[in-house]
Amino acid sequence: MSAVIAGFARSPFTRAMKGELSKKRPDDIASEVINALIRDNNLNPELIEDLIVGTAFPEAEQGYNIARLLIFLTDLPETVPGVTINRFCGSSMQAIHDAAGRISLGAGNAFIAGGIESMSRIPMTGFNPMPNPKLIDLYPSTFTSMGITAENLAKKYKISRADQELFAIESHKKANSARESGNLTEEIIPITTDTEPIQEDGCIRADTNQESLAKLSPAFLENGSVTAGTSSPLTDGAAFVIVCSKEFAVENNLKISGLFNPLSKEAFLQKPDIAHLKPRFEDWALIKALQEKLHRF
C-alpha cells in the first residue's frame, strides 16, 4: 500500500530557557497538538493503530514510554498503543518513516507520528550521562556534536563564514515572510499557558543582518566559522502528522498533503564521515544490500 501524509499540526517553536514554552511540560505540549490534529481533521481516534513519538532525550517529563503515556493525556482511546523512538535530531522523522514503512508492509493503515522536545526542561545529554569509557579509545569522536559536524562540513565543502551568514539571513527572511503572509497559521496550534495562548514562533529574527552576525564569536571552535547566528536555536516544541494509506485517507475524507518515495541510492549511500563516524564496512556492502531491499517498496 502507498503511504501518505493526510494531516499535520505543530506547536509554535520557541527559544529554550527564554521562550514562552519553557515553563510548559513537553507532554502537555504534545497532547494539545495531538488533540488538535485529531479534531481539525475530523478523525475518529479509534481508527489510529499506534502513536509513534520521537524524542532525542527520552527522560524526565518526556521519559518512560512517553508515547504510551500521551494516550492517557489525549483523546486517543486507551486501546491505542504507543512507542517511543530515539534517533537524536532525526527522532520525529524516524517516527514518520516507521509509520510509512509499516503501511508499506501491510502492518497497519493509520498512525499518528511525530515528536516532542523540551530543551528547556531536559538538558542536552540528559540528566545523568554515562558514556562507555571504552569509546574514548576506540571511537573518540563518537559523541561529536552537531556544532562540530557543521564545522567539519564547512571545512570539507569550503563553506565560508560569509556564505553561512548570507544563508542564515535569507532563511530568517523567508520564515518571517511566511509568518507575515499567514502561511504558517494553518499548521500552528495555539498552546495554552497560565496567561495567554502561545500562537507564534519565537525563533524567527526578521532583523538579522550581516553587521550583527559578523560581531558574533565562533560557537564551537576557537578559530571556527560557525556561530550562534548560523546555528539552529535551542528550541521547545512538538509536531505530529497523520500517516496513513491512500485508501484510508480517501475513505475518511482526509486531505492528502504528502506522498512517500523510496530514498535515492545517491542519498542513502552518502558516506557518514562528516562526523568522523565511519562504518566498519569500508566496502559499503552492508549499506548496498539494504539499499537493494529499499527498491522493493
Image (cartoon, helix red, strand yellow):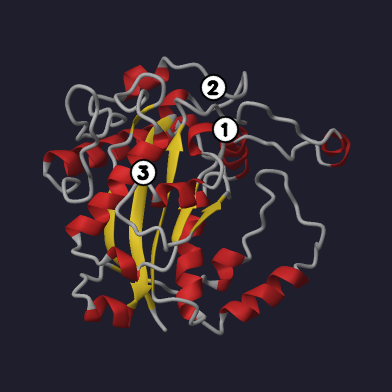
**Mark 3 Cα-neighbour bin, 10 Å: few <14, some 14–19, many ≥20:** many
Gap between marks 1 and 3 measured at Cα: 27 Å
**Mark 2 Cα-neighbour bin, 10 Å: few <14, some 14–19, many ≥20:** some
Residue at point 18%, 40% (across, down): 179
**Mark 1 Cα-neighbour bin, 10 Å: few <14, some 14–19, many ≥20:** some
- Which one is nearer the viewer's eye here, 293 or 170? 293
Q: Is residue 67 above or below residue 249?
A: above
Q: Secondary structure at mark 3?
A: helix
- Which one is nearer the viewer's eye here, 224 or 55? 55
- In this view, the residue farthest toward the left is 181
Identify which amino acid the numbered label 2 is placed on: Ala
Residue at point 88%, 36% (across, down): 137
Q: Is residue 264 above or below residue 278?
A: below
Q: Are marks 2 and 1 in contact (CB under 8 Å)?
A: yes
Residue at point 41%, 14% (across, down): 215
Q: Which residue is mark 2?
A: 219
Q: Are marks 3 and 2 in contact (CB under 8 Å)?
A: no
Q: Position of residue 114 (x, y in %)?
A: 41, 53
Image check: 284 left or right of 33?
Answer: right
Identify which amino acid the numbered label 3 is placed on: Ala
| Foreground: disc 3 or disc 2 | 3
Gap between marks 3 and 2 measured at Cα: 31 Å
Q: Is residue 22 above or below residue 154?
A: above
- Which one is nearer the viewer's eye here, 81 or 293? 81
- In this view, the residue farthest toward the front is 78
Reading the chain from its start, which is encountered first: label 3 or label 2?
A: 3
Q: Which residue is mark 3?
A: 30
